[in-house]
Image (cartoon, helix red, strand yellow):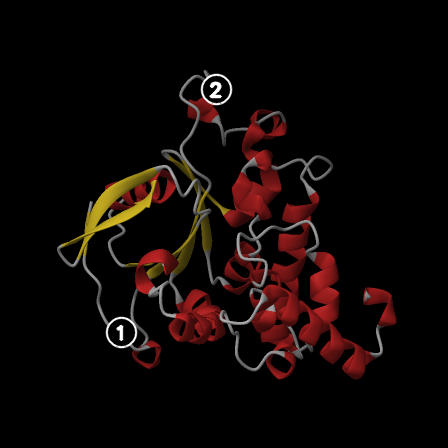
Amino acid sequence: IHCCLEKCSLVEKPSYRALSYCWGDPMDTRAITVNDQIVKVTTNLEAALRQLKSRGFTKIWIDALCINQNDILERGLQVLRMGLIYSNALQVMAWLGPAETNNPREEDFFGTSENLRHHHIFSRPFWRRIWIVQEIAKAQSIEILYGDMMISWEEFNLRAPTSLIPPEISALKTFREHEIIQKTLGKRRQALCTALNSTLSFQASDKRDKIYALLGLTSDGAEIVPMPNYSQDEQDVFFEVTKAILLRHKEFAYL
């Protein structure tokens, strides 16, 4: 896989897609080239790149490649722009990972709700990643990729049995509905304390992201955390955010 980084301004409305995915096992890596330099990425990301390439999707925004992960200041600045990045993308490509090769029903996996009903797709780590809440909620259009198969977000939700989907997917649907209502009717977004309570079961490799990933979806997130700070200890982040929430909303229940 060969990649090339291009500088773009969102003001100029560039045409691109954004990848939503789970980083995967950091010890299980593959080598790709980025601007002629060897870069190690996880096997899951490399598989996503191959699938996107096979479909002719060549202009993709990917956090691991487009953000300098070693620059703490840049990481914080890009977190503030994440909502704009995903809302301006033509599509958000939600990569669930490679399909199981030993499953005889893979070819018609998305064919009927019965196929979907008993499948392990709902237990994929992707659904519990905290960053996908904003990535899904902000997207103009979403395509779900599972191995070689692709289905739209709307079709996926129509076919998935409502009674069996995990709470994380239900939460994603709710956040997306709230964001659409906010855009069309100007309805006020929910408070950060409410969003935190709704995403307790979501996970993050960096615990600070449990807060930072929700800032762009809330009415008071930017005031409570003006600038994400990855140099600050996670306990200090939690303490300061909790104190700010209590002072603003008197929500002692969240202690």
| Left or right, 135 with reference to 59 | right
Q: Can residue 191 be seen at all in this image of the molecule? A: no
Q: On the image, numbered disc 1 is attached to which residue?
A: 8
Residue 118's spot in the image, x, y percent?
A: 62, 25
Res. 100 mark: none
Q: Secondary structure at mark 1?
A: loop
Q: Position of residue 28 (x, y in %)?
A: 36, 37
Q: How far from the left and from the top, in percent, is residue 122?
A: 59, 36
Apparent side of residue 227 relative to residue 97 in the rendered image (left or right): right
Quarter occupied by residue 71: bottom left
Q: Residues within 10 Å of mark 1 (few under 14, many from 20)?
A: few
Nearer the N terminus, badge 1 or badge 2?
Answer: 1
- Residue at screen point 56% across, 53% down: 204
Label 2 neighbourhood size at 10 Å, few (<14), some (14-19), many (20+)?
few
The residue at the point 60 percent across, 50 percent down is 203
Q: Residue at 81% across / 66% down in the picture?
A: 254
In the rendered structure, the answer to whether residue 204 lies left or right of residue 249 reads left
